[in-house]
Image (spheres, helix red, strand yellow):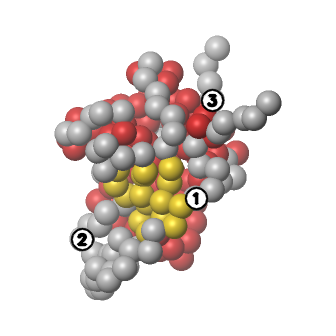
Amino acid sequence: MRIDYGSRLDEAKSLADIFEVVKSLVLNSTGKCRGGLMLGMANLGNHPQGFFGGFFTTGSNVIVLNKIPLQRIKETRPELYKPYVFHVLLHEYIHSLGYLDEAIVRSKVHHITKEALGEEHLATQMAANTVGFIKHLAYPDVSWKPDDTGLELVEGFDRSSVSYIA
């Protein structure tokens, strides 16, 4: 039975929902998975020609998303929100599985996204060429690096790491 990842992404209501789609897709595509991850939201700054969408620090269990592109998307093209979050979470999740080389991760993300969502999906287009979306992700003509990133953890992000008390 083939899973309709496009519909699952469309139906996602939260960051945790989008991450569940990412994890399911990666498990189906690569046979690999990882639980116990947390999501932090932070102001990682802005640069009109490029920026950090997020990062994963090797040896940690936290994926960090930059709040600035999410804010910019809401102002310019809200329909990019889910595809963008999917793209960044998929990229950082692949890193969390031990893939450290950026070129390899970008290639894997593009291949996995194209296979699951098709060539025309916005997430696939982002995976193929993020630069084409920069004007919707970064504020033009403004560059800044925050003094304090103010990391905020998202509650209930990785549902597979929830423990139950009987």
Give me the residue at 22% from left, 44% from top: 102
Amino acid under disc 1 = Val
In depth, the one of 16 and 46 nearer the eye is 16
Q: Real-space Cα distance between discs 1 and 2?
A: 28 Å
Q: Residue furthest top?
A: 1
Which residue is disc 3 drawn over?
A: 4
Q: Residue furthest right?
A: 166
Q: Are marks 2 and 3 in contact (CB under 8 Å)?
A: no
In depth, the one of 147 and 163 nearer the eye is 163
Q: Is residue 105 above or below residue 87?
A: above
Q: Position of residue 114 (x, y in %)?
A: 42, 34
Q: Helix or strand or loop: what does disc 3 sit on?
A: loop
Q: Earlier in the sequence, mark 1 or mark 3?
A: 3
Q: Earlier in the sequence, mark 1 or mark 2?
A: 2
Q: Position of residue 51 (x, y in %)?
A: 29, 66
Judged by depth in the image, the label closer to the viewer, 1 or 2, is 1
- Specify the quadrant that holds the C terminus: top right
Which residue is disc 2 drawn over?
A: 49
- Residue 125 in view here: no
Q: Helix or strand or loop: what does disc 1 sit on?
A: loop
Q: Residues within 10 Å of mark 2 (few under 14, many from 20)?
A: some
Q: Position of residue 108 (x, y in %)?
A: 32, 33
Give me the residue at 34% from left, 66% from top: 134
Which residue is disc 1 drawn over?
A: 154
Q: Earlier in the sequence, mark 2 or mark 3?
A: 3
Amino acid under disc 2 = Gln
Q: Residues within 10 Å of mark 1 (few under 14, many from 20)?
A: few
Amino acid under disc 3 = Asp
Q: Are marks 1 and 2 in contact (CB under 8 Å)?
A: no
In depth, the one of 113 and 151 nearer the eye is 151
